[in-house]
Image: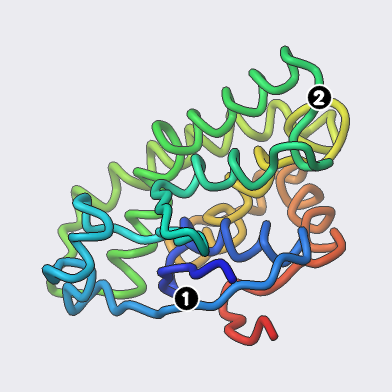
Amino acid sequence: MLVLHDNLGSGNAYKVRLLLSQLGRPFRRIEYDVTKAETRTDEFLARNPDGRIPLLEFPDGRLLAQSNAILFYLAQDTDYLPKDAFAQAQVLQWMFFEQYSHEPYIAVARYWLHFLDPGQVQKEQLEEKWRRGHQALAVMEKRLGGAGFLVDGGYSIADIALYAYTHVADEAEMELSPYPGIRRWLDRVAEQPGHVLITQDDFS
């Protein structure tokens, strides 16, 4: 069975849980408290020198890190990755956008506000995260204002990658009311077969 080295609060780890659930693939979770440096132990670093989750462990002992790389691997030869080469490149385009222009701002603001002591958060830095996060949301809105999903052809791992932190943007104190296209898209993703909640820990 696949083993997912995981943290229920992590949107990056949630991406993998969501796709595994939608694929119907059984897996076992190992939970780590990242606020207590449990991914920085010698034992974990021997598995992933980068010291981060998610980390997917295969029955044969192979290990794969980085959430979007895991999504791309698991989606091979499934409906979650288009067959057309150009459409595949568009999926990757949105996944790179997520890691470079979206996650560093919305996810970090959420982490600061949701998991850290308020005294650790500097207002000026938080406001910059909000500003850049709203820039990313505006880019998504331009696409989703007139399209059902991020890539033509339907729901894909591009949607999973960006859904993870967008649907909990309220935990980053980022209001989604100015983005009707995004809000409709969030509802569509939540209606997909196999959808699970970010807080769900029962996958039996």
For the C terminus, the quadrant is bottom right
Q: Residue at x 21, y 75 (%)?
A: 38
Asked which quadrant contains residue 202, the reply is bottom right
Q: With 150 as the anchor, is 6 left or right in this view?
A: left
- Mark number displayed over residue 193: none
The x, y position of residue 111, in whole percent, is: 33, 64
Determine whether the residue tagged by mark 1 lies in a helix, strand or loop: loop
Q: Which residue is mark 2?
A: 83
For the N terminus, the quadrant is bottom right
Q: What colouring does the structure picture have?
A: rainbow
Which amino acid type corresponds to the residue marked 1 in the rendered image? Leu
- Disc 1: CA contacts within 10 A as few (<14), some (14-19) or many (>=20): some
In the image, residue 62 above or below residue 78: below
In the image, residue 50 above or below residue 135: below
Q: Residue at x 55, y 77 (%)?
A: 28
- Mark 2 or 1, nearer chain start: 1
The x, y position of residue 119, in whole percent, is: 13, 74
Q: CA distance from mark 2 to mark 1?
A: 31 Å
Q: With 170 as the anchor, is 101 left or right in this view?
A: left
Which residue is nearer to you in this view: 174 or 52?
Answer: 52
Which amino acid type corresponds to the residue marked 2 in the rendered image? Lys
- Mark number displayed over residue 8: 1
The x, y position of residue 12, in whole percent, is: 46, 56
Q: Residue at x 64, y 18 (%)?
A: 89
Asked which quadrant contains residue 24, the reply is bottom right
Q: Residue at x 52, y 55 (%)?
A: 165
